[in-house]
Image: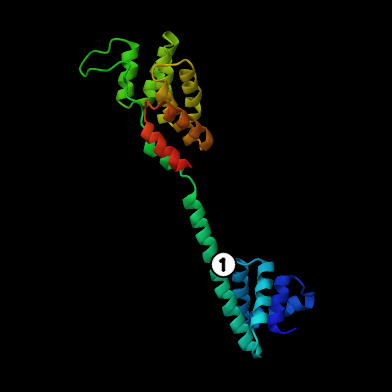
Amino acid sequence: MDKEELINGYFEGVLTKEQLERLALLRETDTEFAKDFEFEIALQKSLKKGERQELKEMFSEISSVKETPETKVFQMRTWLAAASVALVVGLASWIFFFNNSAIDTEQLYAANFAPYDNVVSPIERGNEIEDLRTMAFTAYENEEYTKALELFSRLKNEQNEPYIDFYEANLRMQLGQPAKAIPLLKNYIDNKGQLADRGLWYLALSHLKLGEIEACKEQLGKLIELGTFKTKAAEELLAQLN
């Protein structure tokens, strides 16, 4: 068994104990053999055994000129290296295309979400805080979202007005809790709150944040059908999801 066959036999797993001992000795004493062997090890990381055998057979069919063992090894190594590079480049291109063609829900969410304005209890700057609702919306407008959530929870225990679910859902979304926002929005929409069409928009975005594309598209479709709020934005987002 010559040196090339020894290397091939190693990767094909057919060497005897004596042949493995010879291979180990050559790696230590033959610099050129050691380089060839290390090259094959690197090549195996990008080519499976079956692919390597297929490439070897293809090379044998293409090679029609009788060559010395040294030339054959060099040319085969060069050809396999080129094939390996092509394989890696092709795989990288496929991964790049796949990743870039995938829907980036996080980016779409960030581009479309903003907490809804306070239209229930507008705050006039400089006025004294008179009640819990005013305190809750003051915190909301000041972007003190954790504080606002606590105040809205207290307000819900005292009043349980429908709008509280809507604004609590906005707070949950702002605080990165879309899963908790969804039941609040569904309840608000089912109860036909005055901002129900707004609720559809935020419900769609909550599903988007969770990567639930079909559920998001369903809510966007309902919103577009209503045509009363964010119709153009909903159409654009739906187009990006399709």
The image shows residue 97 at horizontal and vertical percentages of 49, 55
Dot 1: what SS?
helix
Q: In the picture, which quadrant includes the N terminus?
A: bottom right
Asked if 19 appears above or below 106 in the picture, the reply is below
Q: In this rendered view, identify the residue nearer to me: 82 or 131.
A: 82
Residue 106 in view in this figure: no
Within 10 Å of disc 1 (Cα), the crowding (few <14, some 14-19, many 20+) is: some
Point 72% across, 85% down: residue? 2
The image shows residue 9 at horizontal and vertical percentages of 73, 75
The image shows residue 11 at horizontal and vertical percentages of 70, 71
Point 31% across, 19% down: residue? 119
Point 62% across, 71% down: residue? 41
Asked if 225 appears above or below 51 in the picture, the reply is above
Counting labels gives 1
- Residue 106 as seen in the image, left or right of residue 68: left
Q: In this rendered view, identify the residue nearer to me: 188 or 217.
A: 217
Q: In this rendered view, identify the residue nearer to me: 169 or 14.
A: 169
Q: Quadrant of residue 158?
A: top left
Residue 160 in view in this figure: yes
Asked if 154 appears above or below 67 in the picture, the reply is above
Q: Which residue is mark 1?
A: 87
Point 47% across, 52% down: residue? 100
- Residue 9 as seen in the image, left or right of residue 145: right
Q: In this rendered view, identify the residue nearer to me: 86 or 227.
A: 227
Asked if 146 appears above or below 59 in the picture, the reply is above
Which three-letter amino acid code belongs to the residue tagged 1? Answer: Leu
Q: Residue lying furthest top in this view? A: 158
Q: Residue lying furthest left in this view? A: 126
- Residue 104 as seen in the image, left or right of residue 30: left
